[in-house]
Image (cartoon, rainbow, N blue to C red):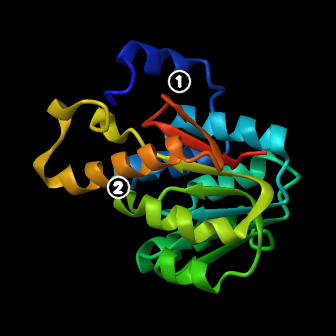
Amino acid sequence: MSNINYDYIEEYIRSVIPRKTDNLFKLRNFAIEHNVPIVEEETEEFIKFLISIKKPEKMLELGTAIGYSAISFTKSSDSIKNFTTIEIKNEMVEIARKNIEEEQLNSIIKVIEGDAAEVINELEDSFDIIFIDAAKGQYEKYFNLVLKNLNEDGIIICDNVLYKGMIANEELVNKRKKTIVKRLRNFLNKISKNKEYQSSIVPIGDGVLLVRRSN
């Protein structure tokens, strides 16, 4: 249970998601078997829906893992011509590149190895959608860094912002996670009160934050 929604709600939502018959099914199972955190199924479908509306040409992702979300999002829309994803762990980078090559998406998806904060400083491209799914305690830092790379009408999507319910319920907070929870709460509070942005927290998966510049 995610502590965001009741188990039966999650189970129902997942039951109506079309079953994957391609390599994504194998990749999700690999992630589960090897305890690699990837985007929740319902969150994946929600973001793919946003992509179908936004029709982005260029996307940026912080936190590649095995390349699952990069592959899934790219395959979901012909509009995506450039997908840049950043991963700090060499082992994950190698797995992701292998998976992307097997999907023949090398010409679209570019995996950059390194610390996201350092890599972003060197990025000059602008993006229509930026997906933040890296170290949760660094979300505010990442958000501020990627703003220079966000197109005027672009969207920033942050995953896991309700963090297993700990953000909303103090009783759920693990002692080892107190700093992360505090930082996430501060980040969410600042975004919600900042009139420069329109934002919404969607209680799906582990919580998704959507942000765009105010008109």
Estimate the spatial distance between the alpha carbons at disc 1 and disc 2, rounded to whole Å: 21 Å
Q: How many marks?
A: 2
The location of residue 71, given as percent across then percent down, is: 67, 56
Q: Mark 1 or mark 2: which comes first in sequence?
A: 1
SS assignment at label 2: loop
User: Who's the residue at 15% across and 44% down the image?
Assistant: 174
Q: Quadrant of residue 131?
A: bottom right
The amino acid marked with disc number 2 is His
Residue 202 versus residue 84 in the image, above or below: above
- Measured as percent of width and height from the top left, residue 106 is found at 74, 72
| Res. 108 visible in picture | yes
Say which of 160 and 13 sits in front: 160
**Quadrant of residue 138 within the rendered picture:** bottom left
> Which of 91/144 is in front?
144
Residue 34's mark? 2
Rendered image: mark on residue 127:
none
What residue is shown at x 51% (from left), y 41% (from top)? 192
Toward the left, the furthest residue is 175
| Figure quadrant of the C terminus | top right
On the question of residue 160 being in view, the answer is no
Residue bearing the label numbered 1: 14
- In the picture as drawn, the residue positioned furthest to the bottom comes out as 122
> Is disc 1 in contact with disc 2, using a CB cutoff of under 8 Å?
no
- In percent of width and height, residue 89 lies at 41, 76
Amino acid type at image mark 1: Arg
Q: Is residue 200 left or right of residue 152?
A: left
Q: Residue at x 24, y 30 (%)?
A: 169
User: At x 76% / y 44%, what residue is drawn?
Assistant: 51
Q: Quadrant of the N terminus?
A: top left
